[in-house]
């Protein structure tokens, strides 16, 4: 049974093991005791088989692993102490000196820093491509290409890749595909079901959902998860702690209703912004004006929370004034929590380099949280009034 309600409320939980408590315990232990030498010998041979030491497997983490694997329709799952850890482990475990990676351009910051700063030290090179056209993948693949790295949608311009087409191409060439699914979560997109080998997401975002935990999820075949567990996870010691795993189990209980609420509110805020005279453009994958709307509708079950506005501004100061005038919407990185956020692209541009003719310089990324959409619209309205 893989019903969503079953996965979120029951799968992996066994109350008879813990005094019939409804909320599973936080198994706050570093190690586990054995009665038989033979049992110890077995676990030394295969630590992925049972509990030995909490840098490896832990019962609270296991409840979460089962739920997250089922949500992705994957065989197995590993949970890390950050999304960045999940990215690093998935890529690092599958390359060696002399290998080549094809990545979509402008992937998540720390994926790009890994490709640019760390992997070249080990003789691994990366080619970035515009992933909106399948021909660009075909052209970039070399005989030594081992991984195709995807992020669909991208979290700034929301560019999509045709996941089925890329998966088919990669299979034929024996290349491993990895997709960052943080934007959609498994509720709105299931890349494994479309043929992608490994799926990762920052659980810091929607899974946690309350801006109080940093964590990352990686799903794929049992064989691949075991390989990464035996090497990268145990060696780097970057697995999630039992307490943070418990927070994510709690977050999962309300994930569907949070996403539904956020989707409805986001549509309202987007429609308000599209009519505003100080807005040049709103970039949102489920908006009719989005260039890849057909692909979005084909491979995504929904879009929510995150979108980008291009502000009509002659000077950078107008964007600065707008962002600094927001009273309720907070200026911060990240997203996926209860609170709405805004972040201007110009924060990473020196003022003297600002170019009003460059659309990217005028981007402000919004995240719509759980507040009343009218409360958010009123906040944006008063900030626009100051930025005129
Ligand atoms: C936040 C984020 C990550 C990294 O996750 P952390 O939990 O912050 O390490 C990866 N990919 C995307 C798209 C993100 O937004």
Image (spheres, rainbow, N blue to C red):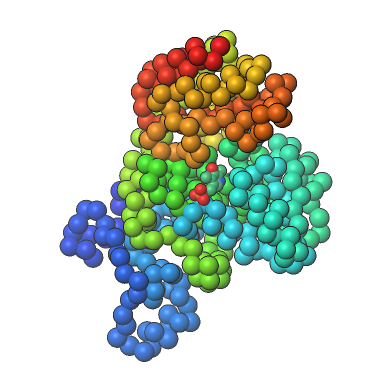
Residue at horizontal 41%, vertical 38%?
337
Q: Choose between 3 and 45: the one closer to the eye.
A: 45
Classify residue 241 by image quadrant: bottom left
Could you tell me residue 268's position as x and y percent? Answer: 45, 19
Residue at horizontal 33%, vertical 40%?
254
Could you tell me residue 114's position as x and y percent? Answer: 65, 55
Q: Choose between 275 and 180: the one closer to the eye.
A: 275
Could you tell me residue 331's position as x and y percent? Answer: 48, 32
Q: Is residue 190 visible?
A: no
Q: Choose between 346 and 339: the one closer to the eye.
A: 346
Relative to residue 227, is residue 294 depicted above or below? above
Residue at horizontal 76%, vertical 64%?
123
Residue at horizontal 76%, vertical 57%?
125
Classify residue 145 by image quadrant: bottom right
Q: Is residue 264 left or right of residue 131?
A: left
Q: How many marks?
A: 0
For this orientation, the residue located farthest to the front is: 352
């Amino acid at each position: 049974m893989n019903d969503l309600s079953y996965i979120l409320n029951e799968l992996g939980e066994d109350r008879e093991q813990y005094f019939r408590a409804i909320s599973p315990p936080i198994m706050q232990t570093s190690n586990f005791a054995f009665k038989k030498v033979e049992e110890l010998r077995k676990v030394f041979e295969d630590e992925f088989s049972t509990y030995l030491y909490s840098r490896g497997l832990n019962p609270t983490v296991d409840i979460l692993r089962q739920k997250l694997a089922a949500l992705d329709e994957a065989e197995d799952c590993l949970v890390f102490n950050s999304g960045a850890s999940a990215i690093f482990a998935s890529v690092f475990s599958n390359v060696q000196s002399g290998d080549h990676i094809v990545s979509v351009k402008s992937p998540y910051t720390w994926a790009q820093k890994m490709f640019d700063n760390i992997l070249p030290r080990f003789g691994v090179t990366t080619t970035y491509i515009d992933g909106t056209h399948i021909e660009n993948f075909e052209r970039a693949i070399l005989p030594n290409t081992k991984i195709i790295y995807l992020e669909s949608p991208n979290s700034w311009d929301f560019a999509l890749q045709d996941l089925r087409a890329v998966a088919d191409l990669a299979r034929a060439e024996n290349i491993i595909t990895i997709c960052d699914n943080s934007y959609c979560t498994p509720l709105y997109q299931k890349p494994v079901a479309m043929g992608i080998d490994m799926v990762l997401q920052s659980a810091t975002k929607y899974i946690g959902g309350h801006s109080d935990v940093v964590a990352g999820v990686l799903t794929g075949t049992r064989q691949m998860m075991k390989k990464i567990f035996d090497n990268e996870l145990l060696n780097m010691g970057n697995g999630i702690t039992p307490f943070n795993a418990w927070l994510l189990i709690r977050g999962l209980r309300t994930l569907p209703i949070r996403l539904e609420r956020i989707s409805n509110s986001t549509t309202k805020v987007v429609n308000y912004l599209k009519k505003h005279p100080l807005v040049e453009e709103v970039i949102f994958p489920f908006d009719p004006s989005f260039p890849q709307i057909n692909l979005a509708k084909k491979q995504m079950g929904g879009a929510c929370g995150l979108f980008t506005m291009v502000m009509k501004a002659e000077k950078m100061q107008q964007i600065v004034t707008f962002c600094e005038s927001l009273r309720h919407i907070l200026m911060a990185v990240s997203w996926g929590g209860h609170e709405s956020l805004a972040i201007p692209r110009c924060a990473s541009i020196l003022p003297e380099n600002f170019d009003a003719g460059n659309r990217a310089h005028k981007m402000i990324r919004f995240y719509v949280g759980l507040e009343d959409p009218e409360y958010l619209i009123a906040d944006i309205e008063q900030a626009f009034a100051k930025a005129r």
